[in-house]
Image: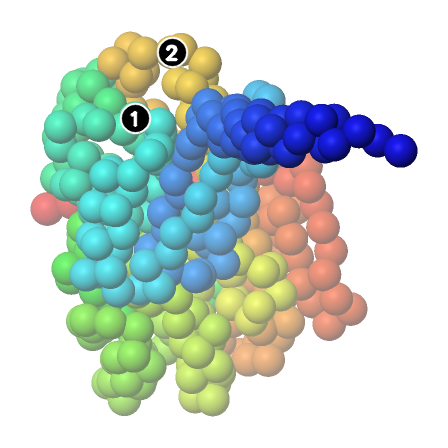
Amino acid sequence: MIPSSVFAFLRRCVPTVALLVGTSALLLLTDRQSAKRALPAIAVLQQTSSMVLEDAVKGMIAGLAERGFVDGTTVTISRYNAEGDMAQGNAIAREIVGGPFDLVLTSSTPSLQAVATANTRGQLKHVFAAVADPFSAGVGLDRADPLVHPPHLVGYGSLAPVHATFLIARRVNPRLARVGVAHNPSESNSRRFMELARASCKALGIELLEAPVENSSGVIEAVQSTISRGAEAIFVPGDTTVVSAVDSVIATAGKADIPVFSVNPGAPDRGTLFDVGFNFREVGLVAGRLAADLLSGTDPKTVPIRETAQEIPPYLVLNVAVAAAAPDRWRVPEDLKPQARYVIDGAGRHDQPDAVFKGPFDEAPVR
């Protein structure tokens, strides 16, 4: 039989033991939370859910992982999407800059601009990609000197070769006279593409039928308006608003028996006649590697603004099946086929991973 004095002793010890257990548990939880907070924190913002921007973000995350920054293990990555809403994008940018992040990656020109505006004091290091012409984005860059930029802001421009695109269109249809294009004038990247498209069309004697849009809901109506004005083909520029509705653009043009060509290679067999541009997963990949360099100690002030084409050449996609539907108007020259990374014909898709598009890459002079 246990003496009553022992029971009394145990009763006195229970609160102390409970306190020690509780304190140990709290310290363990705090240590785990502190360890989690100690991981570098990265935010990723994209403007919309288009395939181009999704591919760029996937590439960014893969580029980080290549250098050892793996989400959930050695770094925490939080993804944000403005879903095409400029106001929402600005709000998200402010949230990111005020949040617990060490670095932010942006995919698209509007996302670059939103974060650059919110981050003027340089609270976060900022790496951008999937931006056609960052020098025209109004974020403090100097086209004449790639080392002139805000000390926290670096990244890659990825301006696709517009004149080469129209040269191919003219080769595929030597009689091509009118091309329709929907574009959002509020996007600086779109304005740059349109400058180059106008110059190219002027040099080639092609009439460019323009239809401005404010948001993705107006894209189809804009494309239809160019078709009603006699467009013989539709050009899709590097315009975030229009690219977000590209599948609908292809379907709308198809109903009118009009082909679509673009500077935004997506799914090779999605239905465009041809595309000339970049693999945006590769675009994101180089940006992710750059972000990893900054996290590892590289000073962004020492990094120049770079052009994607310096590291990744643009590539060509040809859909011979689309041209074959109207052989009296559209015919793909044989010498172009070996230059295409993907060729789609009646038998399906043929991958040529080592194919090199020869250009030319010089733009028509902008006047």
* Image coordinates for residue 19, horizontal then vertical, percent: 55, 30
Q: Is residue 79 left or right of residue 75?
A: left
Rendered location of residue 176, percent (x, y): 36, 70
Query: By what rule are the colours in the image chosen?
Result: rainbow
Residue 134 higher or lower than 226, as above or below:
above
Instruction: Name the residue located 13 percent from the left edge and 32 percent from the top edge.
Output: 120
> Height in image: 49 above or below 39?
below
The three-letter amino acid code for the residue at tag 1 is: Lys
Q: Nearer the viewer, residue 277 or 242?
A: 242
Amino acid type of the residue that numbered disc 2 sits on in the rendered structure: Thr
- Between residues 124 and 39, which one lies in front from this camera angle? 39
In the picture, measured across the screen, residue 176 lies left or right of residue 94, that is right
Using the image, tell me which numbered label, if any, was put on residue 125: 1
**Could you tell me which residue is drawn at 74 percent across and 26 percent down?**
6
Q: Are marks 2 and 1 in contact (CB under 8 Å)?
A: no
Looking at the image, can residue 212 be seen? Answer: yes
Which mark sits nearer the N-terminus, 2 or 1? Answer: 1
Give the residue at x 29% y 79%.
Answer: 217
Residue at 37% in and 60% down: 48
SS at circle 2? loop
